[in-house]
Image: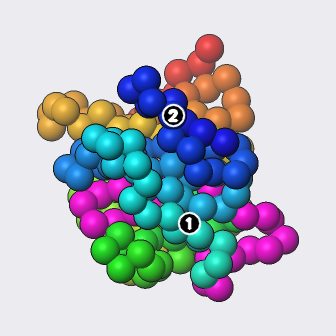
Amino acid sequence: MYISFNYSVLKGHTDYIHCLCFKEREEEILSGGEDGAVRIWDSRTNRPVHCIEVFKYEECARPQFGKWISCLATDSDWMLCGGGPSLSLWHLRSMSPTSVFPLPGCQREAVFHQDLIMSVGEGPHVSHCLHGGTVKAQIPCTPSSLNTLALNLKNTEHRVMTVGGSSHQIDVFTNFSYRAFSLSF
């Protein structure tokens, strides 16, 4: 499998690619796929920098669920990696996992926000996790399963988080600790 970027093709994955994220400071692209690998690419040269085979780490491996990677996020020297179905926090300099979060089911989207990690996936809640692996809170949502989470942090006065999933409703959070309202379509 390959990724087309800036009129270039990045080759290396051996199966479907599920997720991409950009690490702007280092000008790197991270890709995760069905093959259970996270590949890190230099966006200036379009060459591979590292390949992390997540499924080979015992604490992240879940053989009965396959090898796939479902979500990626980065923050400085850290990477969140979901799939198989654990959500794990990785230190990118050492290329090793530091925490595996005890969340039920596959986590489909995760983001870093201040000292928290926010995650959504199977289940009707947004999980707030600490970097050490503890789940601090699970905030109820309208859909029974969640696929996407987005944060608008550009305006400190009007911070907004939205989540959507297996329903015709999108939940809107103006305070990240409770759902303010839902939009119906």
Q: Badge 1 is on which residue?
A: 87
> Regarding mark 2 in the picture, which secondary structure is present there?
strand
Compared to residue 4, the image places residue 122 above or below, namely below
Say which of 160 and 112 sits in front. 112
Q: Image point 53% across, 59% down: which residue?
A: 38
Compared across the picture, whether 179 is left or right of 57 comes to left
| Residue 123 visible within the image | no
Q: Residues within 10 Å of mark 1 (few under 14, many from 20)?
A: many
Applied colour scheme: rainbow
The magenta segment: 58-80
Q: Check residue 69 for magenta coloring.
A: yes
> Regarding mark 1 in the picture, which secondary structure is present there?
strand
Three-letter residue code for mark 1? Leu
Q: Position of residue 80 (x, y in %)?
A: 45, 62
Exactly how many numbered labels are in the figure? Answer: 2
Say which of 83 and 30 sits in front. 30
| Residue 55 visible within the image | yes
Name the residue furthest right: 64
Q: Position of residue 85 (x, y in %)?
A: 68, 64
Q: Badge 2 is on which residue?
A: 9
